[in-house]
Amino acid sequence: MTKKEIQSRVLQNGEPLSLDKFEWDEKTNTFSSFEDGLILDFKNINHCTFNTGFDCTFHTGFDCIFNTGFDCIFNTDSYCTFKTGANCTFNTGSDCVVVRRDIYEVIELKKGQKIKLNRYKIKGFEVIEFEVIEDEDEKVDIRISKKSLQALKDSGIKIIN
């Protein structure tokens, strides 16, 4: 893929990221940017490396490597490695591992288990569990554990009753 094609897959504030704000190495499939708050849509694209700032959201294929800051969200397939800061959320396939940079910790991720890392310098994570229930009025109720609700509130997500 060309750098121009990659640009259409990376948004910042709802707009494609300016070409001068990132690098793309076609030979190694490596995306690099010092920018924060990116949304990267690399679904069905495998064997990529991402070097980014914080507060980014990733949608990728398998066998990817992520070197990021904190507060990132990862929705990936299997065989990925994450070198991140605190407060990140993971929903991955199998055989993935997280290496936290703010505190020495290695976490093996389980397929189908969504987790959120604890805050800065606090080891561990919370499992985020939820259930979506639809009714005939096309309304959606989401039932989550109290721990998961608190983790969402702590992450800054606005909860509306």
Image (cartoon, rainbow, N blue to C red):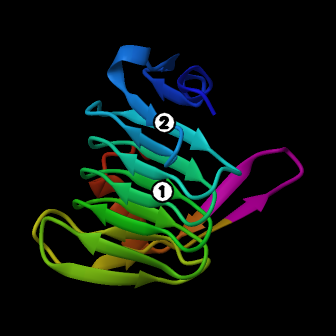
Which of the two discs, 1 and 2, labels the residue nearer the N terminus?
Answer: 2
Q: Nearer the viewer, residue 159 or 89?
A: 89
Q: Is residue 127 visible?
A: yes
Where does the image place residue 77, in percent across and percent down from the top left? 62, 66
- The magenta-colored residue range is 132-142
Looking at the rendered image, the quarter that the N terminus falls into is top right
Q: Is residue 18 visible?
A: no
Classify residue 95 by image quadrant. Answer: bottom right
**What is the secondary structure assignment of the residue under circle 1?**
strand
Question: Which quadrant of the structure image shows residue 134?
Answer: bottom right
Label 1 and label 2: CA atoms lie apart by 10 Å
Amino acid type at mark 2: Ile
What SS does tag 2 mark?
A: strand
Residue at 54% x, 78% y is: 113
- Residue behind mark 1: 74
Asked whether, in this view, residue 123 is left or right of residue 90, the answer is left
Please name the residue shown 50% across and 20% down the image. 14
- The amino acid type, in three-letter code, at marker 1 is Phe
Instruction: Identify whether 7 is placed above or below 107.
Output: above
Residue shown at 57% from the left, 58% from the top: 47
Residue 59 lies, in percent from the top left, at 57, 49
97 sits to left or right of 79 = left
Q: Is residue 138 magenta?
A: yes
Closer to the camera in the image, 64 or 136:
64
**Residue 39 marker:** 2
State yes or no: residue 118 in magenta.
no
Single out the residue that lies furthest toward the front.
27
For the point 25% across and 33% down, which residue is it? 34
